[in-house]
Amino acid sequence: MKLIIAVIKPFKLEEVRDALLALGVQGFAASEVKGFGRQKGQTETYRGAEYHVNFVPKVKIEIAVSASLADQAVEAIARSAQTGRIGDGKIFVYDIERAIRIRTGEQGPATL
């Protein structure tokens, strides 16, 4: 099993969701987060005045998938989240050592 964490632009969330559902991903968690990368924030204009925003709003998606589906899920996220501009985000993939469904006590891949 793999845990995929992706940090993407907020307006791309629905496109990513649709791409993952098309693959058969049955669910994921999404959180609103703030952060910065190489761009070190961004400059915005409000009522004619420019100001610098140190933390850029993003959405963090966390998805647990079978190892056989992980590469396809990563490709789907990358393809649907890409705008070609700075700040498109990052994807991280981790191994899941153990998973338990709390309601039934199932363990391992059956929890997905």
Image (tube, rainbow, N blue to C red):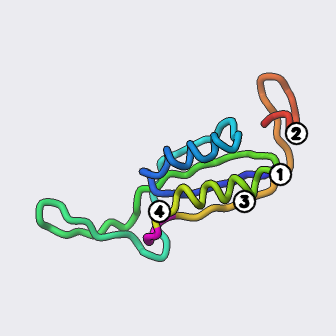
Residue for badge 4: 35
Which quadrant of the view contains residue 86? bottom left
* Residue 87 counted in the magenta span: yes
Q: Nearer the viewer, residue 74 or 6?
A: 74
In reply to whether residue 79 is colored magenta, the answer given is no
Residue 29, image x, y percentages: 60, 41
Which residue is most to the front? 22
Numbered tag placed on residue 108 in the rendering:
2
Residue stretch in magenta = 84-88
Badge 1: how crowded within 10 Å, few (<14), some, or many (20+)? few
Contact check, label 1 and label 4, Cβ < 8 Å: no
Q: Based on the displayed image, in which of its 4 quarters is residue 74 positioned?
A: bottom right
Quarter of the picture containing the C terminus is top right
Q: Which residue is mark 3?
A: 93
Image location (x, y in percent) of residue 59: 50, 51
Instruction: Please state which amino acid type lies under the numbered disc 4.
Output: Gly
Pick the residue in front: 68 or 61: 68
**Pointer 3: residues within 10 angstroms few (<14), some, or many (20+)?**
some
Residue behind mark 1? 68
Looking at the rendered structure, the secondary structure element under dot 3 is strand
Camera-nearest label, 2 or 1: 1
- Of all residues, the one furthest to the bottom in this rendering is 38
Q: As displayed, is residue 111 above or below residue 6?
A: above
Left or right: residue 95 compared with residue 22:
right
Where residue 17 sits in the image (x, y, percent)?
56, 44
Q: Earlier in the sequence, mark 2 or mark 1?
A: 1
- Whichever of callouts 1 and 4 sits on the residue coming sooner in the sequence is 4
Alpha carbon of mark 2 to alpha carbon of mark 1: how far? 14 Å
Comparing marks 1 and 4, which lies closer to the viewer? 1
Q: Which one is in front in this view, the residue at disc 3 or the one at disc 4? A: 3
For marks 3 and 1 on the same chain, the one whose residue lies earlier in the sequence:
1
For badge 2, the amino acid type reads Gly
